[in-house]
Image (tube, rainbow, N blue to C red):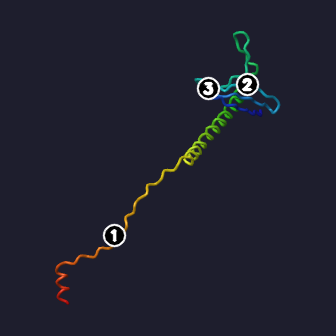
Amino acid sequence: MNIKPIIKLQEDKNNLKAYADVVLEESIMIKGISVVDGKNGLFLNMPSKKNGDQYYEQVYPITKEFREELTKAVIEEYQQQLDKKMGLAVEKEPEKQAKKSAKAPKAKEPELETPEPEPEAKPEQTEEQDAGMAMSM
């Protein structure tokens, strides 16, 4: 069966992770399926209506096989949407850092004073060299 889930991620809603609308065979849409994180992992809550103290599912899969197929399709799409959102968050993080560093004033580099080069020192003559020069004259 052709199942096309449309996921709407939820932020900080306890165990509720997303709502899903599902298009079946491009012919009918089921709205208001909840993706819930339970103690045994993710599962679907089908749309229901309260009557007195009880809730009654308005739409539900009749066969176990179709329930599994529907659950698999919705949870896979939920995971893709979540990964996409997290991927964007990870990609935006370096972008934010780059913007912050571009806005931050650059620290001035300390100016180093370069000493003027000293004139080359002439080698000192030893007394022997002085005596030798005096004799040659």
- Describe residue 54's horizontal placement relative to residue 37 as left or right: right
For disc 2, the marked residue is 32
Numbered mark located on residue 37 in the image: 3
| Residue 44 spot, x, y in % from top left | 68, 25
Amino acid carrying label 1: it is: Glu
User: Which residue: 63% across, 29% down?
Assistant: 11
For disc 1, the marked residue is 118
Secondary structure beneath disc 2?
strand
Quadrant where the image shows the C terminus: bottom left
Secondary structure beneath disc 3?
strand
Q: Residues within 10 Å of mark 3 (few under 14, many from 20)?
A: some
98, above or below 27, in the image: below
How far apart, in angstroms, are the residues tagged by discs 3 and 1?
78 Å
User: Which residue: 74% across, 29% down?
Assistant: 21
Amino acid carrying label 3: it is: Asp
How far apart, in angstroms, are the residues tagged by discs 3 and 2?
16 Å
Secondary structure beneath disc 1?
loop
| Residue 77 spot, x, y in % from top left | 68, 34
